[in-house]
Amino acid sequence: MSLSTVLLRRAAKRAIDTAKGALDADRALQSTMGALIDARRAEHEKRPQPRWRSGEPLELLLAGYVGSRNTGADVRTEEMIRQFRHLLGDEHASLSILTIDPAWTRGYFKTVRQREVPQLFPPFLYDEVRRYHGVIACEGSMFKSKFASALTTMMVGALGLARAEDKLAIGYGGEAGAMDASLEEMIERYVEGSLIITRNPESSAVLSRLGIETRVGTDTAWTFGGDEIDGPSGLSEPLLRRAGWDGNKPVVVVCPIHPFWWPVKPDPWKALVHKVTGAHGKTHFRSIYFHHDAPGVEKKLVSYLGKLSDGMIDLARSRDVFPVIVAMEALDRGAAERFADRVELKTRQRWPLFSSDEHDMYELVSLLRRASLVVSSRYHALVCSMPAAVPSIGVTMDERIRNLMKDRGTPELSLEVDDGHLDAKIREHGLALLDAPDAAKAPIERSVARNLRTMGEMGAMFVDHVRAAHPRFPFRAGLGEGHDPLAHLPPLPAAQERILETYGSVATPR
């Protein structure tokens, strides 16, 4: 083969790859977002925007994934806001938050102004971010392609636009994982210089390989609670009694998901076909976004739901318990209903289902904390149950639950969604936890205490970062690194106060 032929073929391949990239809606979204960041930077260099001035409120925009009735996202954001209000003071700060659907965040996030974000968000962010003194990215799955590259593009876009104007740009308690190469390039280019506080060392390692400096923190859901959530006569009791609970049987919660229809990707052509013909309805997420629907997805889902339900049925038959199903996100309802159908087919019983499209975060977390065992494929169902020391098993599709169980010292309780022996392992570990719950209690509560302390340390990092950018901001005395981390937490519910009293002295950071 001649050299000219080789060069011609290489050129043709590059042309094809370029064409594919041009037709890739995710990359088009990233390119658009990047171009807008570059334009804002050039504009700022010519006409710098005014910075925060002493005496006026510090205006911050929280960018995340709220408004989809994802209980975990809502809880962690609620507690983040409580912490920021505690540190900044309501009289000195004005917080706003992006929401996908204001109807589903109505009643959440007190004192915070809600701004509806469109599905095609780059132009909106370009106009919106300039109104604030800084941006805080608050999505848990902040830098990863597992769920939706578009979500990470939005996080990077918000941070990048803030950085382009030399404003505060903070990623707070997020996770990083496997990403498309184009996203990695975008992060390298636009996130540098932001304060990125991850929720585990593994996430920091991912970003470090991209040249992004990070601090290690934790999730922010640890401080959630209150009497109506944690108390024995709280929100969960009337829900359970209406569902048939006798008030005595141990409650066992299972949280199924659809693990295999991710990532969500934009597809304008499929959206057009869907609009005209109604095709692709089962995988349509919203707007131009569609779930993954490659061959084999349905088969994998059937196997997962089958193994999960068989294990839970065996568990329920072996002990006299009251099993309930919790859908932690509205998107989980379909998988939860199919799980319930399989249980009914095998047992002639319909297990009660509580879904986040009908129940708010306060009710669902109350249900989790009333349980004697939680078996969940949702990360935040595990986190939110832990302040009540509820024994739990994770059934995972990615690194989040693995990292949590490793942090807790119970890596054996992180099971895989495609494990051929998932049913047997659920039964084995579930019975052990139901029969000896006290053995699981101490590791869980130590983990909660440690994460509460780490969340306080995150608050101190936040204070010092804001103080470095705005030295005249009126923080009260005793805040910042070098001071008591626990002083940086919002007011704590009784359950977390008790855990800190018991384990606070041994709760050292990772």
Image (cartoon, rainbow, N blue to C red):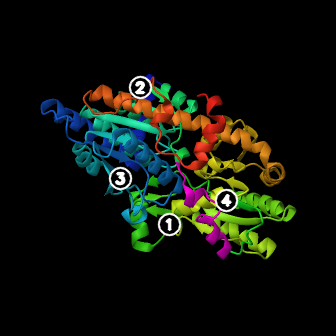
Instruction: Report whether 374 appears left or right of 292.
Output: right
The residue that disc 1 covers is 280
Q: Which marked residue is nearer to the observer: mark 1 or mark 3?
A: 3
Q: Disc 2 on helix, strand or loop?
A: helix
Task: Residue 237: give x, y in percent of width and height.
Answer: 64, 68
Q: Nearer the viewer, mark 1 or mark 4?
A: 4
Image location (x, y in percent) of residue 500 = 60, 38
Instruction: Name the secondary structure under disc 3.
Output: strand
Question: Which x, y percent locates residue 211?
Answer: 44, 24
The residue where tag 2 is placed is 4
Q: Label 3 is placed on what type of residue?
A: Leu
Q: Tell me the residue at 34%/33% (across/down).
A: 476
Earlier-in-chain disc, 2 versus 1: 2
Indicate which label's residue lies in the foreground, 4 or 3: 4
Disc 2 to disc 3, C-alpha distance? 54 Å
- Nearer the observer, disc 2 or disc 3? 3
Q: Nearer the viewer, mark 2 or mark 1?
A: 1
Distance CA(mark 1)–CA(mark 3): 28 Å
Q: Is residue 391 visible?
A: yes
Q: Which range of residues does the magenta coloring cover?
A: 224-242
